[in-house]
Amino acid sequence: MRFQLIGDVPGIAGVARYYARVWDTTEDVLSSETLHCIRHAGGATIGAFDGEELVGATTGLFCPDGSVYSMIAAARPGVGHPLKLAQKDWAVGLGARSMRWTYDPLVSRNARFNLVKLGAVVTEYTVDFYGPMRDGVNDGDESDRLTVRWDLTGSREAHESEPAGEVTANAPDGEPLARTDGERIWCRVPRDVVQVRKESPGLALEWRKAVRGVFVDAFDRGYVATSMSREGWYELERQK
C-alpha cells in the first residue's frame, strides 16, 4: 500500500470518478475542477494505491484558524485508517494542530471509526447540512451531519460503557433509543441505515428525526459525543 499526493490532471480525474463510484452517482461528488482548485489553494488530495489501483482517497484544505477541514474521504475496507494517518502526516507537516470533518450521525460504522479508532470528538450537530442529496447513498433522506474534531497533537482513548439508567425515548423499532444516568447520555442508531433507506425510506426518516431530537437537545445542554459501541450506542458526556 502506498499513499501519495495527487495533483496531475489524469490522477485528479481518477479521484473524481472514484468518489462518484463510491457514492453511487453519475454526477460529480467533487468535480475535477473543484479538486484542482483545492490543490491550487493549498489543500491536498491524497490517494491510496494497491499497486496501480486507487483504493482510497481523501481531500482536505486549510482553514483560517490553522486547522484542516477534511472535505471527503472514501476507502476500501482496511484502508481508511492508514489513509487518515497519511492525511494527518500531511496536515501536521504544514503546522496544523487539529482536523475536523462531518459525517452522517446514523452511520454507526463511521461513528465508531471516528470516535473509537481515531479518538476524535463530536462537537456539533447540524440539521440538514447539505439540503437534499441525490446520490445513491443519501437520496430520500435529510442530510443531518455531526462535526468531529480530531486533535493531531496527542491521542485520546475512547472508553466504552454499557447504556445505563432511565430510558428517556424509544426508537422507531420500539426498543430504547436513549438512556441517561443523570450525567451521561446514550443514544442508539440503526446497525445499517443505508440498508434501512433502501428497504424503507420512511422508516429511515423516522430514525433521522428521533436521533436528531436526542442530539440537538443534548448539545444545547453542553454535551459532546465521545464514543460509539459495537452495538450502535453513542455515548455523550458534558463538555469539559
Image (cartoon, grey):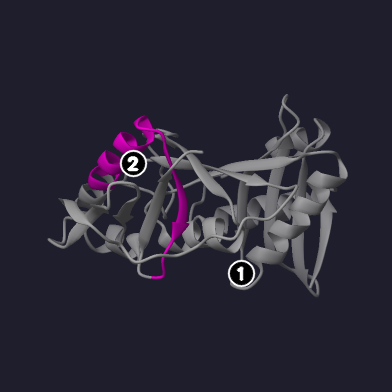
Name the image quarter holding the N terminus.
Answer: bottom right
From this viewpoint, which residue is outermost toward the top? 64
* Residue 5 % position (x, y): 83, 52
Q: Answer with the quarter of the image where residue 44 lies.
A: top right
**Is 125 positioned to the left or the right of 142 in the image?**
right
**Relative image position of residue 199 (x, y in whole percent):** 24, 63
Residue 81 appears in the picture as rendered = yes
Kindly identify which numbered label has been placed on residue 215: 2
Question: What crowding class fits label 2: few (fewer than 14 Cα within 10 Å), some (14-19), or many (20 or more)?
Answer: many
Label at residue 181: none
Which of the marked residues, 2 or 1, is nearer the chain's N terminus? 1
The crowding category of the residue bearing disc 1, from other C-alpha atoms within 10 Å (few below 14, some 14 to 19, many at least 20), is few
Report which residue position mark 1 lands on: 76
Relative placement, left or right, of 158 versus 153 is left
Is 217 a magenta residue?
yes
Pinpoint residue 33: horizontal percent, then vertical percent. Answer: 71, 36
Q: Describe the element under mark 1 as helix, strand or loop.
A: loop
The amino acid type of the residue labelled 2 equals Phe
- The answer to whether residue 31 is seen in the rendering is no
User: Residue 147 location, x and y as percent?
Assistant: 51, 40
Q: Nearer the viewer, residue 185 or 49?
A: 185
Residue at point 70% right, 41% down? 98
Query: Residue 77's quadrant in the figure?
Result: bottom right
86 relative position to 114: left or right? right
Residues in magenta?
209-230
Residue 100: image quadrant is top right
